[in-house]
Image (tube, rainbow, N blue to C red):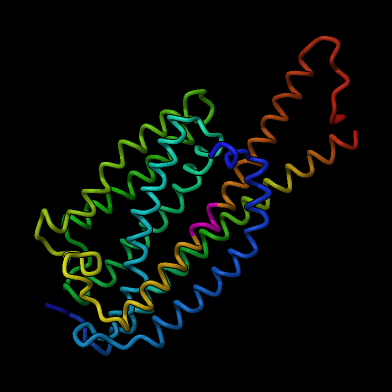
Amino acid sequence: MTLVRPEDYIYFVVAAYTVAAIGLTGLLLYAWSRAHKWTAQADALRAESTKS
Amino acid sequence: MHRFANPARFLRLSGWLLPWLVTAMIVAVSAGLYLSLIKSPPDYRQGEMVRVMYVHVPAAWMASGVYFSLVIASIVSLVWRHPLADVAARGMAPIGAVFTAICLITGSIWGYPTWGTWWAWDGRMTSVLVLLFIYLGYMALWSALEERANGSKIAAIFAVVGGINLPIIKFSVDWWHTLHQPASILRRGGSAIAPSMMQPLFTMWLAYILIFVVTLLWLMHADIARQKIEARVARQANTADQPGMHQGTTGS
């Protein structure tokens, strides 16, 4: 038995897409920022040791 | 196979591929959202709630698919000791955990108006919840054993043993006839879903696969760079500890 009127289904749709968007955008930003941080550090260290 | 397991070659190849994959990912996500939110018709029984299926079902496929890949990478790590297998397995865990969480939450959002409950201890839902705990346990194990020489081996064994949950997830709807509906796409007698709804479903799945690949490559790049830095710092510390070797290379 459903407790929700069909005209209110749209709120559930918006909630589901919001959850997916937040989760996947967060995941992409997390991965991109980690890649950026560590590769920048590795490049800086390599440049420093090449210079010296 | 070993030729592609070389980290330097992997970084070169994936660095070249990444901009193309990111572009394909943006196109696939845009197409998936258009097809699922605008083009797809409402279902004759579920109405607008069918649109939740386009984010929920591909997330469920990805949750199991990513774990299957993690098990394969762990087996490769245990058997052939590929340098990239551990890096790949480790990168897959947070991605799989996010897909599993999305699957559980969107399933719950779909369940309340459709079934009249947010959650039930049904075979499929419970086994997917167990999958989320396995992902979290795997990540916790990695961070606890990172410093140990056999840490990767223990994590790989854990991942392979956790793989027993995958057939349980797949066949749970056949073994226990509880709340979750049985398979409606990959089943004997063909799919039970209308072609107009298959198109957004598979486009969203493609978008999710591209998100997985892009995220995994970024995480692998980060892990390889981190390992290089740690190895370099350890080498410098060893050199500095040896008598007569204090000239150093970094000047620090």
* Magenta region includes residue B214: yes
* Magenta region includes residue B61: no
Q: Main secondary structure of the magenta part?
A: helix
Q: Quadrant of the C terminus of chain B?
A: top right
Q: Is residue B28 left or right of residue A19?
A: right
Q: Quadrant of residue B46?
A: bottom left
In terms of depth relative to the viewer, which is nearer, B234 or B7?
Answer: B7
Pinpoint residue B214: horizontal percent, then vertical percent.
55, 58
Q: Residue at x 72, y 29 (%)?
A: B233
Pinpoint residue B169: horizontal percent, then vertical percent.
23, 52
Against B209, is B145 above or below? above
Q: Residue at x 32, y 64 (%)?
A: B105
In terms of depth relative to the viewer, which is nearer, A24 or B116?
Answer: A24
Against B158, is B37 above or below? below
Q: Is residue A1 left or right of residue B243?
A: left
Pinpoint residue B146: horizontal percent, then vertical percent.
52, 31
Pinpoint residue B172: horizontal percent, then vertical percent.
17, 54
Q: Residue at x 34, y 79 (%)?
A: A13
Q: Which residues are magenta?
A: B212-216
